[in-house]
Amino acid sequence: MPEAPLPEVVEVARDLIRFDTTNYGGGRSKGEREAAEYVGAYLESIGLTPEYYEPIPLRTNVMARVPGRDRSKPALVLHGHLDVVPAIAEDWSVDPFAGEIKDGLLWGRGAVDMKDMDAMILTSVADILRAGDQPERDLVLTFFADEENGGVEGSALVVRDRPEWFAGATEAISEVGGYSITAGGRRAYLLQTGEKALIWIRLVARGIAAHGSRFHPENAITRLTEAVAALGRTEWPVRLTDTTRELLEGLAALTGASADDPDALADATGAASGFIRSTLRTTANPTGLTAGYKHNVIPDRAEALIDVRVLPGTEEAALADIRRIVGDDVEVEVVVQDIGLEVPFEGALVDAMVAALGRHDPGTPVIPYLMGGGTDNKALSRLGIAGFGFAPLRLPADLDFTGMFHGVDERVPIDALVFGKTVLTDLLRTY
């Protein structure tokens, strides 16, 4: 018997995964142009007129506006990014860019970050328009380049050079929110209402170049590694915001545990605990080391890359702490720095997102959370647009979904994609 056809949302997500849009950072990328042209062709196929903006060769952004029934209402931005982080193929059990379907899941780089949501946006709008209907309000569909490099060659340039794309918009929806977790044997959805600030820093240690056989206390690599170890092993204290207080209260109600021990409460969420614990404090993770050029030469310079994420409003205090931790012999260079975001868990859009989930998974709580990473909502905030994370996925309790972000064997359940598209379509019809 022939295999049953795949749901369209799965087909589109699979197609997008097959475009290798690897972003290595620092301006090194395979580019998003082919994926953006695919998105543009899909938008044209459902009667929309895409606009492209490519400020840097191959770094293509694409947008289309969908007229709503009530154009007096503020427009809603639905946005995704088309780039992905690198995938080392030999570490994977499947080809990371094949878009393979296996065991009821779609596998590949971008399956959760975030070509799944890109596909959900496209097919949700397609369902509405093909039915001869309209969304409740204008939608601004935007697919950015370079999000995995902080958006410096993507959303930052679009917001600067094409602000008219977002005329009349006051709110936005994107990735890393709306997915389910399981705690205390119960399911709940995390709705993202904030993001930590990103600070990418470079530590630089200097010494004196010399022969590798020397007695040589002024070794740049030794200085650097001592600083990296000190920073990487720092236990940053818990510091709650309005969002994380509400998160802990919601988890306490879900599990019956006390909110007095935030880390223990986060651990009750199982596989999601790594994401949740990171929202409670500063994190500073070493992610790269560069030094030396020959086995018997002591180099005069050594560098390390550190990915720092801090709670909104604590950026300068965190940098001061980092300089104290690494000491005076190591320079701290800020490579990229952006802002943190936090909006209240209230208002008509929040109510609509909660209600849409409730119609398709009745009785399941929805809890706000502050994401440890970042999205292109930060760029849109410069236009006064309040951003949320709402890529609704109902997930099995035993799937380490948060571990898929930038991980090996990234994958998403097919039925979760179908659920997400259904919920998102419902939201766009009614809000």
Image (cartoon, rainbow, N blue to C red):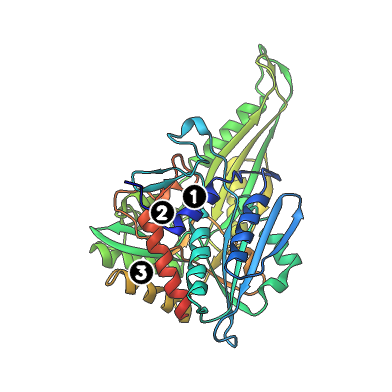
| Residue, disc 3 | 366
| Residue, disc 2 | 6
For residue 114, say whether it is visible: no
Pinpoint residue 33: horizontal percent, then vertical percent.
68, 51
Give 159 or 393, whichever is nearer the viewer: 393
117 sits to left or right of 217: left
Name the residue rendered at 74%, 24% in the picture: 208
Within 10 Å of disc 3 (Cα), the crowding (few <14, some 14-19, many 20+) is many
Query: Please, is residue 120 above or below residue 13 in the view?
Result: below
| Residue, disc 1 | 14
Circle 1 — which element? helix
Pinpoint residue 413: horizontal percent, then vertical percent.
37, 52
Q: CA distance from mark 1 to mark 3?
A: 29 Å
Q: Are marks 2 and 1 in contact (CB under 8 Å)?
A: yes
Query: Please, is residue 86 above or below residue 384 in the view?
Result: above
Pinpoint residue 302: horizontal percent, then vertical percent.
67, 31
Circle 2 — which element? loop
Within 10 Å of disc 1 (Cα), the crowding (few <14, some 14-19, many 20+) is many
